[in-house]
Amino acid sequence: MTHDLLLAGFAQLDASVERVVVSDFQGDTFYGRIHLRHVGPSEKPERPERDGLNTVLDARPSDCIALAVRAGAPVYVAAAVMERCGTDMLTTPASLQGGFPPTERAQTVLVLTRQEMVRFGRDELTSDLLLLGILAEGKSRAARVLAGAGVHAAPGRVAVAVLAGFGDKRPPDDRLPEPANPAFRALAEDAARELGDRFIGTEHLLLAMLAEDEGPARRVLDHLKVDTTSLRQHLLNALRTEE
Amino acid sequence: MESELDAALEEVTVEGIRMNLLAPTRVVLLKAVKRERYLPVIIGVPEADAIAIKLQGTRRFRAR
């Protein structure tokens, strides 16, 4: 593969991967670096000019990790990135346990929602941020129906910023956040039951948002001039035709 | 310089890759070596495969 080719190239140039670092997080993108160590004169006497030289390459974290697992090199994360974007436990919140289990995709949406909480300085999971989590994941049926209604992540974030602004808090470290509205879980389960499902998927989360009284997600959709009644109908139609 | 650099870095291992058979994204989970802290990083499917191919058989690899 390409990563093996790259490593072979490094070896030909008398360099080896010393370590890789996930060094930064900006916007919604992680950045990485590959630290190369050039072979010294004792190992390669014919190339003394490279002694002790180190080279740092900017790279995507995925490429960094793929190279590190091949080279047997250690992987590091910048302490600031680990503090800001890391989590102490990847357990499913209590509000999504017990009854119907969340799908893998719904769990991915929760991880992305946590990043939206960091972005907006919130310590509570409200449905407006959950909506942004669904939009950030982008591939669920709920996200596709939202895209069909012209709802995308960037304008969604602008709407949340306008309606609710930025706080100075951060989500809890020891668990994935739970919905601040205790009724939200019941709304999502009702939606699942109505559709004959025994799991909580993103479509159920979106239906719960639309059913939530005075809900923050509803306010975002209203702000974006989305007809929530027809959005709900489109989602139900999409679910029916895909079955 | 080396120790100054290390103070700002935390070593991690590749805990696993979470996948959804329907989604064109994967999450690679990095776990801190010295404590219970995780960093989930969203990556593409080919990138995840490039990591998974090497992890399988050589280290604990959990696909869920």
Image: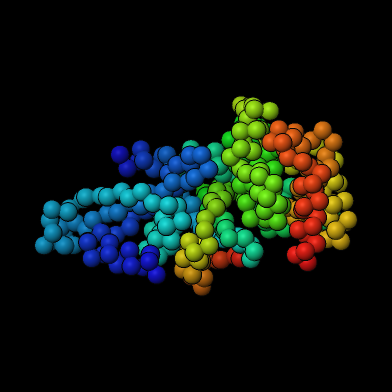
B7 left or right, relative to A53: right
Q: Quadrant of residue A181?
A: top right
Along the line of sight, which residue is nearer the eye, A61 or A146? Answer: A146
The reply to whether residue A111 is visible in this rendering is no
Answer above or below: position of A143 versus A81.
below
As drawn, is B42 to the left or to the right of A102? left
Residue A76, position in %: x, y?
44, 49
- Whether residue B18 is visible to the viewer of this picture, yes or no, is yes
**Residue shown at the point (68%, 50%) measured from the top left:** A148
Residue depicted at 45% across the width and 42% down the height:
A24
Instruction: Work out which quarter of the rendered image holds the C terminus of chain A and state it.
Output: bottom right
Percent across and percent down for residue A152 are 62, 44
Q: Quadrant of the N terminus of chain A?
A: bottom left
Judging depth in this view, the residue of B34 and A233 nearest the camera is A233
Q: In the image, A52: left or right of A197? A: left
Examine the image and state in which quarter residue A221 appears. top right
Q: Name which quarter of the figure residue A9 lies in.
A: bottom left
Residue located at (56% from left, 50% from top): B40
Residue extending furthest toward the bottom: B57
Residue in the picture at 63% in, 66% down: B21
Count of number-bearing discs: 0
Please state the horizontal and vertical placement of residue B50, each as a whole percent of the image. 46, 65
Give the colouring mode of the picture.
Answer: rainbow
